[in-house]
Image: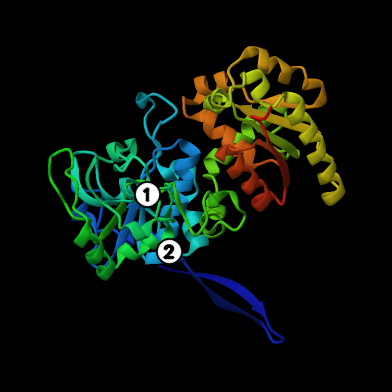
């Protein structure tokens, strides 16, 4: 659509009105260009005949599932396919808490623009009226010691009933079963020759309806994409990890979530709507299920977990580095944690005089719902000028990447679990 407006252009003789052509720019990656129409009962009815797709699922905790989505989109880049992203599922909450669309937490229009590619969601493709059969590959069955496909709640959320075929052994990082698959080892299954070679030596396993279905070609589908790497084990910890550098760093939070986080901070610090958020250092202290590592090392948690004083020392180091490198005086600290012990939190309250704060998760849940304490934690973590996190926690790792990439910030990771 073209809009015409007018302005006056003054010349030496007399003013002349000239039209300015304003063109309404159409989103080149709009969802409607990659499906036939509104969501349909059966996903095949809504796929374009001239388009190839790829999808995959996660079942490893919220942050790990987000990293799984990075991997999915990166495989879409390698295969020149349209990624179909599943919803967030409440792995950390009761199922009754419901699901969240990917785009309800993340800024999908910006994501598409920065990547220069389409991104669609399963909710754009099909309704939840009926279960659909689909043939998928299972890298987890081939790479893991369990030797079985990974069934997860995301498939339940979108009502897909997959029949899995184990991926070829050459899709693994190593010949031994060490969990990791490689991006290209999976991506090459998106082409007919490698697909045919793969199914020649592997038989599909029956789905819940006892149907055996070979992997779909139009929708390249994988059971579990968390463990996918380029050429090194636990590669996502490195700064060169391709799924972060080419995908993850472009995945910003939905503006509504950012606004909610900013308003929460303004209320906590009694700032007006017109006052900017002052710089702060965000802290993430992961405990929770890390207790199993303490048990494995035969350490009581009070000696296994890093003390609050270790985080305080790291905060001071980050504050000093920000002053030296950026000439910023950071006075405020925001602590996020999954710890529920009131005695532990009393140590954080004792540092209020030093500018330490924490979000009121109880009030946030009461006002917004059970998902929001976690969501606001990760958004606030990403807003820090500096960051201090917990070693081995992917939530901390991703927060540190965001602070460094988005805010030109600095950070530290605190080790634990050592005698």
Q: Nearer the viewer, residue 254 or 175?
A: 175
Q: Nearer the viewer, residue 36 or 219?
A: 219
Q: Estimate the x, y position of residue 214 in percent, counting from the top left.
A: 18, 55
Distance from disc 2 to disc 1, alpha carbons, whole Å, reads 23 Å
Residue in view at x 49 percent, y 62 percent:
115
Side (left or right) of 389 relative to 279:
left
Type of colouring: rainbow
Snapshot quadrant of residue 6: bottom right
Side (left or right) of 41 relative to 112:
left
Q: Quadrant of the C terminus?
A: top right
Name the residue tied to disc 1.
143
Q: Estimate the x, y position of residue 284 in percent, counting from the top left.
A: 64, 33
Snapshot quadrant of residue 323: top right
Q: Are marks 2 and 1 in contact (CB under 8 Å)?
A: no
Q: Mark 2 or 1 closer to N-term?
A: 2
Please, which residue is most extreme toward the top here? Answer: 343
Disc 1, SS: helix
Name the residue tied to disc 2.
77
Q: Estimate the x, y position of residue 120 in percent, counting from the top left.
A: 37, 53
Snapshot quadrant of residue 97: top left
Total tally of numbered discs in the picture = 2
Relative to 103, residue 378 above or below: above
Q: Estimate the x, y position of residue 78 in percent, counting from the top left.
A: 41, 65
Q: Quadrant of the N terminus?
A: bottom left
Q: Nearer the viewer, mark 2 or mark 1?
A: 1
Side (left or right) of 195 relative to 69:
left
10 Å neighbourhood of mark 2: few (<14), some, or many (≥20)? some
Q: Which mark is residue 354?
A: none
């Amino acid at each position: 659509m073209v809009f015409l407006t007018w302005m006056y252009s003054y010349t030496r003789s007399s003013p002349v009105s000239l039209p300015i052509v304003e063109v309404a720019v159409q989103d080149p990656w709009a969802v409607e260009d990659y499906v036939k129409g509104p969501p349909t009962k059966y996903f095949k009815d809504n796929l374009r005949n001239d388009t190839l797709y790829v999808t995959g699922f996660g079942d490893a905790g919220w942050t790990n599932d987000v990293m799984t989505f990075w991997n999915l989109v990166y495989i879409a880049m390698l295969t020149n396919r349209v990624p179909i992203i599943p919803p967030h599922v409440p792995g950390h909450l009761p199922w009754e808490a419901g699901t969240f669309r990917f785009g309800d937490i993340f800024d999908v229009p910006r994501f598409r623009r920065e990547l220069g590619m389409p991104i669609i969601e399963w909710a754009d493709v099909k309704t939840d009226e009926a279960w659909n059969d689909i043939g998928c590959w299972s890298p987890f069955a081939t790479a893991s010691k369990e030797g079985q496909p990974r069934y997860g709640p995301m498939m339940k959320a979108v009502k897909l009933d997959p029949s899995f075929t184990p991926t070829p052994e050459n899709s693994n990082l190593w010949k031994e079963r060490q969990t990791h698959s490689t991006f290209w080892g999976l991506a090459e299954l998106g082409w007919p020759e490698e697909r045919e070679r793969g199914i020649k030596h592997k038989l599909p396993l029956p789905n819940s309806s006892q149907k055996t279905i070979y992997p779909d070609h139009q929708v390249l589908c994988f059971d579990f994409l968390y463990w996918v790497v380029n050429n090194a084990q636990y590669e996502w910890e490195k700064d060169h990890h391709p799924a972060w550098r080419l995908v993850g760093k472009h995945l910003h939070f939905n503006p509504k979530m950012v606004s909610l986080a900013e308003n929460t901070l303004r209320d906590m610090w009694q700032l007006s709507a017109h006052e900017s958020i002052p710089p702060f250092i965000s802290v993430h202290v992961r405990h929770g299920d890390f207790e199993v590592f303490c048990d494995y090392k035969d350490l009581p948690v009070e000696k296994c977990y890093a003390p609050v004083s270790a985080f305080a020392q790291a905060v001071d180091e980050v504050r000093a580095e920000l002053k030296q490198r950026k000439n910023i005086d950071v006075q405020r600290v925001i602590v996020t944690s999954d710890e529920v012990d009131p005695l532990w939190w009393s140590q954080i309250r004792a540092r209020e005089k030093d500018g330490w704060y924490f979000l009121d998760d109880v009030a946030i849940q009461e006002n917004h719902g059970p998902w929001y304490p976690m969501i606001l934690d990760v958004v606030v973590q990403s807003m820090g000028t500096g960051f201090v996190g917990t070693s081995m926690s992917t939530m901390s790792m991703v927060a540190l990447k965001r602070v460094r990439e988005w805010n030109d910030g600095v950070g530290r990771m605190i080790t634990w679990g050592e005698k």
